[in-house]
Image (spheres, rainbow, N blue to C red):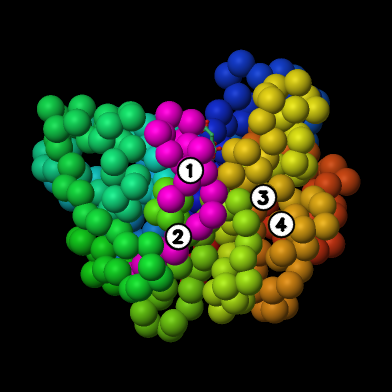
Amino acid sequence: MQLRVLGSAAGGGFPQWNCNCPNCDGLRRGTLKAQARTQSSIAVSANGQDWLLVNASPDVLAQIRANPELQPARAVRDSGIACVLLMDAQIDHVTGLLMLRERGSPLPLLATPEVLSDIGEGFPLTRILSHYCGTEALLLQPDGSLQTVPGLPGLAVRPIALSSKPPPYSPFRHCPRPGDNIGLLIENPDNGARVFYAPGLGEVTPELLDLMAQCQIVLVDGTFWTEDEMQRLGLSKKSAAEMGHLPQSGPQGMISQLDRLPPGVRKILIHINNTNPILQEDSAERSLLAEHGIEVAWDGMDLVF
Ligand code: MLT
Ligand code: MN
Ligand code: ZN
């Protein structure tokens, strides 16, 4: 089983178009030891030809160009993307659906009822796409049960309801429901190996920690270093918690949660906001992660399990 990180940044990407925070400005000037990153998405394949796209980022076209494996060229019009799965209805995870409209047949779309309602109403992507290729909605139940993926026989996933937040445009922003946000256990049926993927994670519950402990790799929310990162830089009034993200630092932060996993579990942060000091490869924060055995995902990173 192969997992390719297509985009490892949070919404806005790195550098963000209108941002002159120390990271974005430093990257543009070439004074920062860091790599540019596109917005949050991964692709998973059992055979290296047919892929499940997990989240459709606004950068999906650039990501397809940067990853030629997603274009197997079996016909005059073709794509390796057999199906799209959405983990939430945030703009950085769904807007790329519009870029896939030239398909010749309806796009198979796996999502929870909550996510499908947000992208059918608040941000009516499926209604718009009905005038192009159309979508074939397939309901995901975020109850941890094993679910097959249409068109991808070697692949099975277990969606898990998470505590986080639906997008700002959702009528449920201030009263989140299970299903607004999911984590995904991706399993290799041949060897039983598992990856847990959760780019938006507001809380690590004891149940979730148990589940993560049974994985070979966890690929989790790396959005913010501190709870008040955006506020301190004067970029937003919102805290990490208000945005549904658990920061890395602090006594209950992601680092201390990941420290509780057994030594064999590979720990990787993804969905990194452009303000996060871990993007700077020679920063003290990045060294601290390394001391805790935590890696930082990058665009093009491959995980085989
Ligand atoms: C989030 O997950 O909070 C997003 O990256 C926000 C956004 O896309 O604007
Ligand atoms: Mn996001
Ligand atoms: Zn920035």
Side of 239 where 187 appears, left or right: left
Residue 109 visible = yes
The residue indicated by pointer 3 is 246
The residue indicated by pointer 2 is 161
Coordinates of residue 277 in the picture (x, y in percent): 78, 39
For the point 80% across and 28% down, which residue is it?
Answer: 232
Magenta part mainly helix, strand or loop?
loop
Side of 103 where 19 appears, left or right: right
Task: Confirm whether the magenta stretch covers residue 125.
Answer: no
The residue indicated by pointer 4 is 254
The amino acid on which the numbered mark 4 sits, given as a three-letter code, is Met
Q: Among all residues in the image, which is located at the extreme front?
A: 175
Tell which of 187 and 128 is nearer to you.
128
Q: Circle 3 sits in a helix, a strand or a loop, which is it?
A: loop
| Alpha carbons under labels 4 and 3: distance apart | 6 Å
Q: Circle 4 sits in a helix, a strand or a loop, which is it?
A: helix
* Magenta-colored span: 156-177
> Is the shortest distance between ligand 1 and the CB of mark 4 under 8 Å?
no
Name the disc covering residue 175, or none: 1
